[in-house]
Image (cartoon, rainbow, N blue to C red):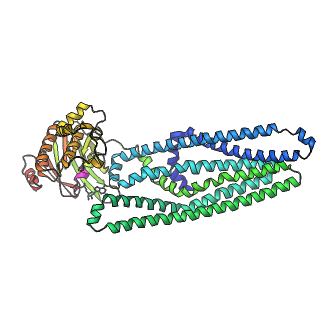
Amino acid sequence: MSFFAADIRPILRHFLAERRRALLLGAMLSAATVTAGIALLGLSGWFITATSLAGLSAAAAMTFDVFAPAAGIRLLAIVRTAARYGERLATHDATLGVIAALRERLFRGFAEPRAARALLHRPARLLFRLTADIDALDSLYLRILVPAAVAIGAALAASVLLGLMHPLFGLCFGLFLAGAGLGLPLIAGRAARRHAGRRAHGIEALRSRTIDLIAGQTDLLMAGRLEAQRGAIAAADSYAVRADDRLNRIETGLTFSFGIVSTLLLTGSLLAVAALAETKTITAPVAALGLLVAFTAVEPFAALRRGALELGRTMLAAKRIAPRLAVADVTEPLATPLPGYAFSLAGVAAFHENSAVPVLQGIDLVLKQGDRLAVIGGSGAGKSSLLALLSHELPARTGYVAAMTATLLTQRTELFEDSLRGNLVLANPDATEADLREALAAAGLLADVEAMPRGLDTPLGEGGLGLSGGQSRRLALARLFLRDTPLWLLDEPTEGLDGATARDVLFRLSTMARGRSLVIATHIRREAAIADRIAIIEGGRISEVSCRGEAAFERALGRLRPD
Ligand SMILES: Nc1ncnc2c1ncn2[C@@H]1O[C@H](COP(=O)(O)OP(=O)(O)OP(=O)(O)O)[C@@H](O)[C@H]1O
């Protein structure tokens, strides 16, 4: 059970912190529903038997009070219905509230720079965490914790009641019911765990491979890999189906075992109440009550069946989500550099997640406020990683990092399926209409936007569809202009643009950057030429830094790709 507790604890903590009262209320109402059900059936059994016995003699029939038990039955029926209604409302409202908060918290965790960077490499993972994994967690409360608590409560209440008829009867009944009723779902849960995990992995693979097939149809066709991709989808499907089949078998076995246990228990209870009635320890109506109480106390355990089968999936979700909850709020801000400096790095080494090789090492570099630095080097040398370090996306393993608040213009322009306005205000939610227009004008995109019938409200398709490459880059630039930070980090800002557009974009950038510090990671001469200094990075180490006017600076520029 320790594996269960370790993974589940952080999730439970979140559940309780979020909606403690509603969750407890839901559990109490659930217990009230079951208790009222047990009492209703027990009292009804007692009433029917007592009435028929009273009817055997005229004297007894005259004195028998039918009103009090009938009123009790009606009251219990009303209580059960009302409690069931309230329980559904309370438990579902609490669960949905908790799950929504969990999703938001997870999303915020993913939006943390480091996590976002790691997830960019596996976006399908983010999708599954936010959808399938979070959804799987609603089982924890609704199908595992509440039914287990209610079943234990029902077994306890029934044992006490039957114990009043005969202590040994109550004790044996309670022990057998709790042992078998909890033991069977636990055994089934353990057996199903592996298959539930496999089913989840199979479905994930099925989804991502199908998305790859649809999104990459043309490329797959051109490479002659369409059939292979279809085969991969079929393989994922049959993997999930095999796991499903195993789960169905376990469920059938569990249902069968529950059937045997409840039959044994009821037979035992029938024999016990018959023996007690025979020895006149209890009356016949009380025997009927006892039998029906035993019958209804078994029912809540059957409700654990689904939770047991989903236990594996729930555990997998908890295991994946719990670590993200733990780190969601703990990113420390970077140290502030000394006055007059934009950043300062000393003896820095950094590693990408899951990599044993340092991507940056022995980095000693400073940038004065207002200065412009170009970082050049071969592909994979570590230029983007240096920008990631300065923007606090990549943590330093060793050394000292101090940097002013920075904005990073990434290599790829990330645009969303939203209006132009929506894509712009991401950079500054408080920007006014005038700010947006000013930023667009500075980026050279205002005329294009004004020519569009819906202007700033023009909707963009997925990934910014509807804009040309140049327009997308200008939109990214306008977004940068809306970020009033003292340090701008630009990763190949004009890559992929034609010469004229690139020069225009660079000119605008250079104008808007006046007074700020710039770091430009680049392969292109025109981009490095706007810098005052050039740092060459090779294999994660800075091998040379030169200043404008020095021969080394010109040599470094000469190494770069011309326009
Ligand atoms: N998130 C990541 N996880 C693991 N390794 C990474 C990650 N990002 C980059 N790397 C690796 O780190 C090294 C440096 O990458 P980086 O992107 O910093 O190089 P770069 O100089 O900017 O290259 P380019 O000019 O091609 O953009 C490469 O070997 C790359 O494969």
Residue at 42 percent across and 67 percent down: it is: 235
Q: How many marks?
A: 0
**As drawn, is 34 to the left or to the right of 171?**
left
In which of the image's four quarters is ligand 1 placed? bottom left
Residue at 58 percent across and 63 percent down: it is: 250
Magenta residues span 379-386
Q: Is residue 296 magenta?
A: no
Q: Nearer the viewer, residue 89 or 177?
A: 89
Q: Is residue 380 magenta?
A: yes
**As drawn, is 509 to the left or to the right of 6?**
left
Q: Is residue 299 above or below residue 225?
A: above
Q: Position of residue 410 (x, y in %)?
A: 24, 48
Q: Nearer the viewer, residue 281 or 539?
A: 281
Q: Position of residue 554 (x, y in %)?
A: 7, 51
Residue 483 visible somewhere in the drawing: no
Q: Nearer the viewer, residue 514 or 450?
A: 450
Q: Position of residue 520 (x, y in %)?
A: 18, 47
Residue at 71 percent across and 49 percent down: it is: 156
Q: Position of residue 278 (x, y in %)?
A: 88, 55
Q: Quadrant of residue 306?
A: bottom right
**Quarter of the image with the N terminus in it:** bottom right
